[in-house]
Amino acid sequence: MFTDLNREITLKRVYLLLIAAALGGCSQDGVDATGMGGATGTGGAATGTGGAAGTGTGGAPATGGASGAGGAKSAGTGGAPATGGAPATGGAPGTGGKGGGAGGAATGGTGGGAAGAGGSSTLSASYDLGADISDQETQPAATRANLLTLMKAHGFNYVRLRTFVDPTAADGYDKTNGYDDITHTVAFGQQVKAAGMGLLVDFHYSDNWADPGKQCVPVAWQGYTTIAQLASAVHDYTSASITALIAGGARPDMVQIGNEETPGILIHLCDSGGLPKAGIAGYNAVNGAIYLYSSTDGGAPPAGGPAAGGWTNLGMLLNAAAKGVKDVDTGIEIALHLDRGNDLSSSKSYIQNAMTKSVPFDVFGESCYVGTQGQPSDWQTTFTSLASSYPNLKFMIAEYSTDQRQANDVMFNLPNDQGIGTFNWQPSDLWTRSGSNYTAQTDMMLYDLMATAYAARL
């Protein structure tokens, strides 16, 4: 599987180590690409929680499934101070298990809970050098195994996979093959775990991409008329999915309960392309919106449509999602994910409101794309302040692309090991594929250097 280029890379590492020592390990890694399938939005000024606030327009899915990473987004900045969340209960400690979440100290480690066929966590690393490789799900199992082998050889120890509720639905991501449903995620996830890598499963709670410009309510859930019914659907789907993952040998070490959920979750009614319908027709009567905005309208809807459910509704939905995880396995870590890597105020507001609603979560993640979310120095400002304000919370960069070393240095150098890692989103610049074989490209050497620099926590 390894080609002559890999051997050349090995020979070049010594020279790169010398260069890194001279330059302090910093480099600009390439041209930023926020997403493969969408234009970047222009953003807007935030107002109070629950108000109409500007956000990025998001990216329309590209044919074949790649999506834009969204535009510059804004969320409400208001919110009551945190009163503390419900304590995490932990479970049987896994080897090297991570600490408890924002709601309180866990009594066990990451690896506890009902292990099932998926097995409990045996991860000893305290830093996750990860990548989202969901786009490789379409490859045969043997080809995916070759990629995992290549990734591990260059220091990667964690994989992030997304999952949709029903990608074959009328507004679905893949109406023909159903890629990224839980069945496909189990199959790929089992390979990740068999390779000895950590697994993060990213629940979009949508039949298609969820991002700040669109949070589409799954078609099967659009008939519910109360928030209690919608929350029950979230719980049952999450619980069933975690059960299926464990039974299939793909126990996740961490799950995201929402993807770039800056405006909330379960908000829009979407068309066959997975985009919100125009105007008030694009909003579900019962929703978990903090504010109303859609990428189709490029702003808030006209008057006369459904109201934003606010944190009352969103808190119920996030609690239902978290309970769906913990009812099956108390040891799986739970993460929230925004796209506000350069917006401390909105990030802090979201955390405070989630804690006030007693949402149990262990990790808070941000998307950090250069330009869309500022520069690495902005991410450092945001995460350093959040780490100081929430010393019991862990942090990650859930998505990034360029500036690989800088992004990881921001996380790795947070105090008290609060920065637990990063996930490079579909990093096509790191390798090329020919048939079933993958070849490392030049930028992969950056991860060789990071594997050495971060060795104490990998």
Image (cartoon, rainbow, N blue to C red):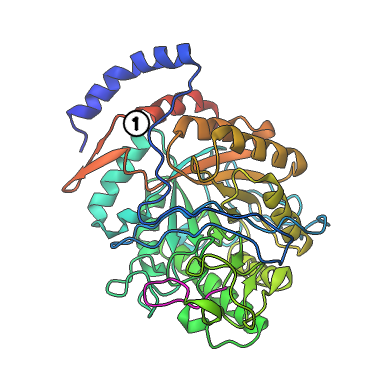
Q: Secondary structure at mark 1?
A: loop
x then y, percent, for residue 151: 35, 39
Q: Residue furthest front?
A: 302
- The residue range painted magenta reads 267-276
Horizontal relation, residue 350 to residue 431: left or right: right
Residue 405 sits above or below residue 353 on the image: above
Residue 388: which quarter of the image? top right
Residue, x 27% and y 34% (percent of image)?
A: 440
Residue 341 sits above or below residue 212 on the image: above
Task: State the residue position of label 1.
Answer: 443
Horizontal relation, residue 439 to residue 398: left or right: left
Residue, x 51% and y 46% (percent of image)?
A: 372
x then y, percent, for residue 206: 48, 71
Q: Does residue 95 show up magenta in the picture?
A: no
* Main SS of residues in magenta: loop
Residue 315 sits above or below residue 13 on the image: below
* Quadrant location of the N terminus in the rendered image: top left
x then y, percent, for residue 450: 46, 28
x then y, percent, for residue 275: 43, 71
In the depicted view, which residue is nearer to us: 13 or 274? 274
